């Protein structure tokens, strides 16, 4: 009987396995994944991998050999159909049963699908898995017309690659600006201009009411009555947490699987980590469901620590002596790559009062600070990595700032942040 | 251990701010030279995660953070300190002589 079973084969699972190995964890680990691939990095799928600049092998978090060396058992192409918490047993889609001592749910997210008329036509693309990326790579060709529904990160990243490839691209966005959910109007305008200059057509305030076509999709119909034709349609309208397995088993869920600061669910033998969780963030003092690599890796680390902590007989005792139990308390951060722009976002900007800019929008290197009560609550940095990295501490420590100082480029930002942090 | 005579002049010590680093290229290899509170160090220049040079990285204490995905390394040992980086940086011996930093390249 396996000791730890991890359900889900994404970056969270790979990180938990790696961290357990670093902690010299001795017991059996089994990973059950629906995917056909070993855990891989998902962000490149809408960036360099889609553009053909990375190999499939380079996407993998770890090689098959590495997992073998770490003593991990793998079940790919396998789905867990039900969870019996009383008997600590999983039932797989082939009716195989598997027991566990401790269970980790790292089931991630799935794409939100548009269920409007025509939704079952062939050729409507979503981008979440390697297979999705392979399909896009096959159909993307110079001169072809691509419609993208949704101007979030994925939609815009794909737009950038497609237009650079010589495709004719239109982005249709429901809200009144792109990146509406994640960024303020200044950043939206900057990116909008960049896309337009690059040849992407962006239409805001428009809603898709149906896909058109007979067997294959050939466009969309919108709420303004107009039809937009295309050779292919990509939909990027967000993701939903895969919480159903947990919910059916009586684990508490609410916009994600509910976990405490040690990533534990309401069942002491079951942890959850990554995209699928809803957890409390001590910096913003509210519960969050994050869709980010940072969250995946951060929660994975806590889970690994908890799993080792719980079984001292099976961990190198010397490591235990130095063990301090750490809770999950990290600043969320995100990134996006479009054209020659590296966007790095620290924190969550919702609820900000004012913004100030350090740097020069025209030079494409700047940081936008989102302020609330004279504190930085978030930053959006474009080609400004140092300021992004330094801002993280300023946000999580909640230091009071003088907006004038933040934007004064005569003041070295590292020196300024040191002074602010020492206050 | 015999130290060979393969010392290369990398830069002046004053070229590197405190708690900072610079890039140093030599032949077809690229390095980072660090000025930390514990002294001067050198590592390979490329992050072991993806194709990013650490020259724009952030040095805090004796840790360097990659600007791309925030992988962190311990500068003196090159050890990868956590996801997403899991492969250590190769380190090189440096010496400070007459206000200059020399790198020992095998």
Image (cartoon, rainbow, N blue to C red):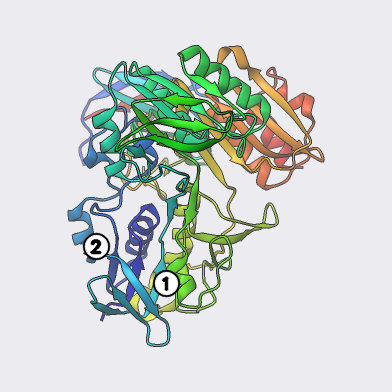
In the picture provided, is A178 more to the left or to the right than B31?
right
> How dense is the environment of label 2, judged by Cα within 10 Å: few (below 14), some, or many (20 and up)?
some
Q: Identify the subunit bearing mark 1.
A: A
Q: Which mark is residue A307?
A: 1
- Where is residue A301 drawn, in percent x and y? 45, 59
Q: Secondary structure at mark 1?
A: helix
Q: Is residue B90 visible?
A: no
Quarter the C terminus of chain B occupies:
top left
Q: Which mark is residue A167?
A: none
Q: Earlier in the sequence, mark 2 or mark 1?
A: 2
Q: Is residue A136 visible?
A: yes
- Where is residue A271 drawn, in percent x and y? 46, 70
Q: Secondary structure at mark 2?
A: loop
Same chain? Circles 2 and 1: yes
Q: Which mark is residue A70?
A: 2
Picture residue at 23% right of the left edge, 25% below the top: B6
Q: CA distance from mark 2 to mark 1?
A: 16 Å
The residue at the far bottom in this view is A87
Picture residue at 37% right of the left edge, 29% below the top: B52
Q: Identify the subunit bearing mark 2.
A: A
């Amino acid at each position: 009987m396996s000791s730890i079973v991890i359900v889900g084969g994404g970056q969270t699972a790979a990180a938990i396995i790696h961290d357990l190995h670093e902690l010299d964890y001795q017991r059996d680990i089994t990973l059950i994944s629906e995917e056909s691939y070993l855990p891989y990095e998902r962000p490149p799928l809408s960036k360099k991998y889609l553009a053909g600049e990375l190999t499939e092998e380079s996407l993998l978090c770890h090689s098959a050999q590495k997992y073998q060396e770490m003593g991990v058992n793998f079940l790919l192409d396998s789905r867990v159909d039900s969870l019996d918490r009383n008997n600590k047993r999983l039932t797989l889609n082939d009716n195989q049963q598997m027991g566990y001592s401790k269970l980790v749910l790292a089931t991630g997210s799935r794409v939100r699908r548009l269920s409007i008329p025509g939704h079952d036509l062939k050729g409507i693309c979503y981008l979440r898995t390697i297979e999705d990326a392979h399909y896009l790579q096959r159909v993307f060709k110079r001169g072809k017309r691509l419609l993208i529904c949704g101007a979030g990160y994925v939609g815009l990243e794909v737009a950038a690659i497609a237009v650079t490839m010589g495709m004719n691209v239109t982005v249709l966005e429901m809200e009144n600006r792109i990146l509406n959910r994640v960024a303020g109007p200044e950043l939206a305008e900057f990116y909008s201009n960049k896309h337009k200059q690059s040849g992407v057509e962006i239409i805001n305030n428009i809603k898709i009411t149906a896909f058109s076509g007979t067997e294959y999709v050939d466009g969309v119909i919108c709420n303004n009555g107009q039809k937009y034709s295309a050779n292919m349609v990509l939909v990027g309208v967000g993701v939903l947490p895969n919480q159903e397995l947990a919910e059916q088993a009586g684990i508490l869920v609410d916009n994600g699987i509910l976990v405490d600061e040690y990533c534990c669910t309401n069942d002491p033998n079951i942890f959850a980590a990554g995209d699928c969780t809803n957890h409390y963030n001590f910096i913003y003092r509210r519960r969050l469901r994050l869709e980010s690599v940072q969250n995946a890796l951060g929660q994975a680390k806590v889970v690994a620590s908890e799993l080792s902590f719980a079984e001292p007989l099976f961990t190198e005792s010397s490591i235990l002596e130095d063990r301090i139990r750490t809770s999950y308390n990290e600043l969320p951060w995100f990134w996006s790559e479009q054209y020659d722009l590296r966007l790095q976002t620290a924190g969550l900007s919702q609820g900000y009062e004012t913004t100030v800019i350090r740097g020069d929008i025209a030079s494409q290197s700047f940081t936008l600070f989102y302020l609330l009560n004279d504190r930085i609550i978030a930053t959006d940095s474009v080609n400004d990595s140092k300021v992004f990295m330094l801002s993280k501490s300023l946000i999580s420590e909640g230091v009071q700032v003088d907006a004038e100082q933040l934007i004064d480029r005569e003041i070295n930002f590292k020196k300024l942040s040191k002074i602010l942090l020492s206050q | 251990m015999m130290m060979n005579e393969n010392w290369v002049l990398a830069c002046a010590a004053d070229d590197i701010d405190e708690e900072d680093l610079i890039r140093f290229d030599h032949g077809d290899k690229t390095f980072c030279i660090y000025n930390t509170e514990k002294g001067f160090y050198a590592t390979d220049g490329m992050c072991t995660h993806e194709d990013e040079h650490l020259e724009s990285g952030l040095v805090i204490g004796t840790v360097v953070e990659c600007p791309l995905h925030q992988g962190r390394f311990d500068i003196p040992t090159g050890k990868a300190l956590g996801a997403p980086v899991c492969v250590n940086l190769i380190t090189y011996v440096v010496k400070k002589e007459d206000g200059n930093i020399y790198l020992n390249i095998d």
